[in-house]
Amino acid sequence: MRIVATALVGLLLSSCAADVLRLEYAGQVSTQAGALVQSAKGYVADVKARRREANIALVASDPSCSWGDVLVIDRRWRPPAGLCDLAGVPPERQERIDLRPLSQDALKTITVAIAGVAAYQAALADVLEDKPPDAKEAINSAIGSLSTASSDINRIAGEKLFDLGVLTSDRAKAVVDLIGTLVALQQTSLKVNAVRAVVAEKDSKPLLSALDDGVTKLAALQDANSASRLLFALDLAYGRERANADFVGRREWIRQIAAAADDSPGAREARIAALRSALTQLAAIDMKLRQALAGEFSKADRQRIARENRAQILGILSQVAAIFPAI
Amino acid sequence: MASADIVVNAFIRLRDSLTTLAARTSLNPQKSILLHRAMIAGSLAEQCAARFGNGDVPGGDRAAAAADAASTAAGNVDAQEATAVDAVIAAADTACDALSAILSSVFSAARRVVREGASNFVGSLRVSPPVPRTGGPVGFGAPAVGGAAAQAQPTYAVSVAKLFPVEAATAFPLAQAYSEGSGFTLLLFIIVILVFIVALRYFGTLKDGKPAKYEIGIAVISFLLWIGSLKGYWIKEGGHPVDWITPDASAGLFGIATIMWVALVPYIAEATAEKEPDGQ
C-alpha cells in the first residue's frame, strides 16, 4: 500500500513539475522572441542612421563632391586632388560609392529569419491547442511572406528565370525549409499528434543560424563600412579646414575623429551582443520546448499553455511585419 | 573561383588592417590615403556580397589572396617608414583593382543579360530544337555530332527545370493555404494557375510563330500530378472522391508518379521533337 501511495505522490509531483516546466519554457520562448525583435529593430534603425550620417559627412568633406545616389571617386586618389575630381582619371579607376539608404536586401535576410522564428513558435502553440483560426491565419501570412522572400532571394542573386541552382544556397534553403515546415503544418489540419510529429522532425537551427549570420554580416560589413566612411570624411575635412579653425574648433574636430576611430570591431561586436545573446538563448529554449512537447500531456494542459503564448506570438508576428512592411 | 564569403571577409580584413595602420602612422598624406583605401576596400566587399550572396566569385581567390597579402603587410610594417607604408598602399591598390575588375566584368555581363533578356525570353523555355536535326544520338546536350542544333540542346537538368512548372509548384501550397479547405476556392486557384502555366509557356516556347504544344501539355500534366502529391484532390468538403485510398497514401502515389514523370519528361519531349521535326 505504501509503495502504491509513494508511486502516486511521485507521479503527481512529476506531472506538476512537468506542467510548470512546459509553461516556463513556452513563456521564455515568447519573451525571448519579443526581445529579439525589439533588439533587431533598434539595431537596424541604428545602422541605417549611422550610414546616413557617414554619407552626409563624406559628401560634405570635399567641395568637389555633391549629393546624389552615388559618389564617383578615384580608386587611387591622393591628396591634394579633390575627392570627386575625375579629370584625367581613366574609367576603370573610377569607383562608385553607394550613397543610397542601406539596401533592404541585407536587412531582408534578418527579417525573414525573425518572421520565421515567430511563425515557428506560432506553430508550436498550435501543437498545444486544436486548430485556432487566428494562428492558422498567422501561418498563412507567414507562408505568403516567405514565398515572396524566397523568390526575392532568387531574383536578387541575379540568376536567370527557372534556374534552380540558387535555391541550393544556405540562405534560400533556410527560407524554403521553413515554408516546407509551415505547409506541412497546414496539411496536418493542425491536429495535435500530426503537428507534434512534424515539429519533432523539423529543426529550427538552420534558420536561427541564418539569422546569426545575417546579423554578423550586417555588423562586420555595412555597419563597419559606415564607420570607415565617417572616419575618412572627418580626416579629409580636417585636413582641408584645420588652417582656418581656431583651437576650440580643432579640438572639437579631433574629438569627433577620435570617437570615429574608437568604433573598432570590438565596439561593433558589443552593439550586436544583446541580439546574439537573445538568439543563442532562443535556440536553447526552443530546443527544450520541442523536447517538452514530445511528451504526453492532457488537453487542458495544452490549452492553458497555448493561451499563455498565443497573444504574445501573434503580437511578435505583427511587430515583425511592422519592421519591414516591404516583404 | 572562391566563395563570396572568403572574398568578402578578406576585404573586410583589409579594410580593418588599413584603418589600424592609419591610426598608427603619423605620416601625411599616407594617413589620409590609408583611410581612403580602407573605405574603398569596404565598399568593394559590400558590392561583392550584394552581387554574389553565398555563391562563388569567378577569379575571387586571386583577389582574396592579394587582399590577405596587403593585410599582412599592413600588420607588419613600420608605421613611420614612408616607403614601407607606400608599399602597403600599392599592395592594397593591387587587391582592390583585382576585385573591381571582377565586379565590373560581372556587372557588364549582368547588364547585357538584362538588355537581351526581354528579346531572349520568347522561345527560351523551349526544349525541343527549332529546326530539323540532321541525325546523331538522342540525348541532352549531345556533343557536336548532331550539328549546331544539337549543340544548342539544353542539358537534361535544364530540360527538367523548363518542363516542370516551378512557378506553379510554389504557388499551389499558397493557394491551398488561402482556400482553407474550400474545394471551390481551390478549384478557382487551380484554373488560374493552369491558365498562367499555359500562357507563360505559349510565349516561352514560341518559335517561328508556333508554340511547342507537347511541352505545354507536359507542364500541365506535371502540375496536375503535383496537386495530387500535395493532397490537393482530397478536400474534406462532403467527403473524399474515393474511399479506398487514404489522402496520405494517395499523396505518396502521386509523389512517386511525379518523380517518375519529372524524370522521364525530358525524354518524352525529345521523342516528340524527333517525331515532328518542327518541334510541334
Image (tube, coloured by chain):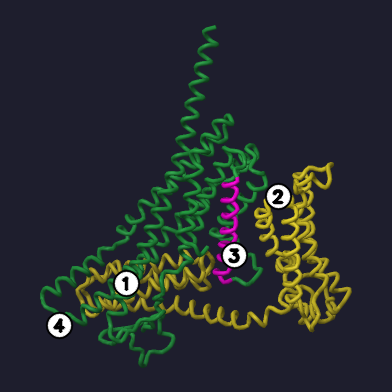
Residue located at (42% from left, 69% from top): A102
Image chain in yellow: B
Q: Residue A254, image x and y in percent?
A: 18, 71
Q: Which residue is the site of mark 1?
A: A54
* Amino acid type at image mark 1: Ala
* Amino acid type at image mark 4: Asn
Q: Which residue is the site of mark 3?
A: A151
Which numbered disc flags the more N-terminal residue, 1 or 3?
A: 1
Q: Is residue B247 magenta?
A: no
Decide: few, some or many residues near mark 2? Use Cα within 10 Å; few <14, some 14-19, many ≥20.
some
Q: Is residue A138 above or below residue B128?
A: above
Q: Residue B190, image x and y in percent?
A: 74, 60
Q: Which residue lies most toward the bottom here?
A: A88
- Label 1 lies in what chain? A
| Residue A161 shows up from this direction | yes
- Gap between marks 2 and 3, in whole Å? 26 Å
- Label 3 lies in what chain? A
Which numbered disc flags the more N-terminal residue, 3 or 4?
A: 3
Quarter of the view holding residue B17: bottom left
Quarter of the view holding residue B66: bottom left
- Gap between marks 2 and 4, in whole Å? 75 Å
Image chain in green: A
Q: Secondary structure at mark 1?
A: helix
- Gap between marks 1 and 3, in whole Å? 32 Å
Q: Which residue is the site of mark 4?
A: A244
Q: Say which of marks 2 and 3 sits in front.
A: 2
Q: Which residue is the site of mark 2?
A: B181
Q: Residue A191, image x and y in percent?
A: 65, 39
Q: Is residue A142 magenta?
A: yes
- Label 2 lies in what chain? B
- Gap between marks 3 and 4, in whole Å? 55 Å
- Gap between marks 1 and 4, in whole Å? 23 Å
